[in-house]
Amino acid sequence: MDWFAVVPFVPEPSMLTTLTIAQDSPNAQGHEPVPPAPEQVEERSLVFEGFAYTCRIVHQDAPQTAPLVLLGGSSQDKYSWQGHEKWLAPLCTLITVDLPGYGTADFLPARYDIDFLASAVRHMLVEIEVPRVNLFGGCFGEVVGLRFAQLYPEFVSRIVFCGAAKRLPETYTDAVPRLSRALELGGIEEAANGLVQLFMSNPSAGRVRKHAVVARLLMRQFMNQTPDEITKAVEHNTRLMTHGCYQPLPVPDVPSLVFTGEYDTLCTPQMGRELAATMPAARFTTIREADHLVTVERRQESADLIGRFCTDNPIDDLPYCTPVESPLVGREHAATVTL
C-alpha cells in the first residue's frame, strides 16, 4: 500500500535483470517488446464534481483481454507505468489516471473520502466509454480499486492488487504525524529519509534486487518534490488517517490475484493474505527478491505476472514467484476444522 510512490524507473544496462520471459508467456512475441507508438496514445481532460483530472489511454486495436486500468501509489501519476507498457500494451488497451487530489489533477480536500475517488474512476470509464475492465491497484491504488470494485462490480472483469492491505500498517500510522509535520515545516531531508526507511525493507531481511539503486531513486524523488506535491501528500495522509482504507463490503466474484514482494515490510505478505481472504477465490503469491517496491525492483516480472493473469495464462510455478496460495480456501478449511 504505497502511500507515497515512485516515478518510472529506467535501469542502466548493468542493472537489468537477466531473467527472460518464458516462451509460453503471453508477452513473448519472439522478439524484444517495444513501447507503444505515439499514435496509440490519447490523453483526456475530465471534470468530476468540479475537480479537473486527466487520464492516459494506450490503445490496442487487437486486444487479447479487456482494457487494463492501472491505479498506482499516491505519488505516482499517469506516466508512472510507462516502464511496464512495452510488456502490457501488446495485450490490451492500458488506462492510467491522475485522480482528483493526485498528480496533475486539482487539489482535493481530505474531507473527500475513498468512495469519492472510486466514483471518479467510474466517471472516467463512463466518459471514455469503457464498460468493463481488468483492474490493477498497486499500494494506495488498491485502496481506491477495491472500493471501486465493491461499489461498481459491473465494471470489473478481473482484479489484481499489489502491495496491498485491508488495514493501515502500524509503521505507517506511527510515522505519518512526524513525517507530515516535517514536510509542513520544510524539513524535506528528514521526511525523505523517513519515507525511504518506511518503504524499503531492512537489508538484513533478505536479498532485494536494485535495493540501493531504488533507495537512491526514492531519496531523489522525495527531495525534489514541488510545493504542490508536498501539499497533496500531506492531504493524502490526512485523508487516509481520517477515513481509513477498508470497508467490509462484498467484493465481486471475479478472478482475483494479490501479490507483493517476499520481503515487503510495509504491507507484509501476511497482510496481503488477509486481503485475499476477503475476496472470493482470490489467489496470493509473492515475487522473489523484492520488497514493497516490487513493481520497480522487478518491473519485467511484475508486468509478466499481471499480463499472464489478465489473459488467463498459468501463473503457477513461475521461477520468480513463491508458490501460489488460496487464502480464502485455507481460512474456510480452518474454520471447519475448529467447529
Image: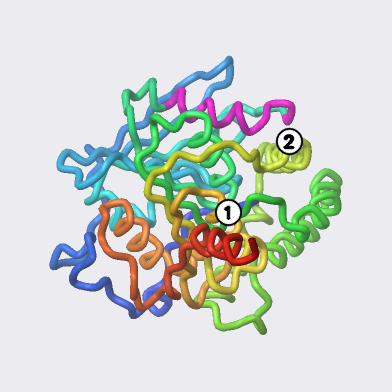
Residue 71 place in picture, x, y as percent: 48, 43
* Residue for point 76% across, 62% down: 194
Alpha carbon of mark 1 to alpha carbon of mark 2: how far? 18 Å
- What colouring style does the render use? rainbow
The quadrant in which residue 206 appears is: bottom right
Q: Nearer the viewer, residue 227 or 235?
A: 235
**Residue position for label 2:** 243
- On screen, residue 84 versus residue 34, left or right, reads right
* Residue for point 74% across, 64% down: 193
Q: Name which residue type carries label 1.
A: Leu
Q: Residues within 10 Å of mark 2 (few under 14, many from 20)?
A: some
Residue 184 place in picture, x, y as percent: 83, 43
In the image, residue 151 sits, relative to residue 318, either above or below, namely: above
Q: Name which residue type carries label 2.
A: His
Q: Which residues are magenta?
A: 110-124
- On screen, residue 187 versus residue 54, left or right, reads right
| Residue 286 lies in the magenta-colored region | no
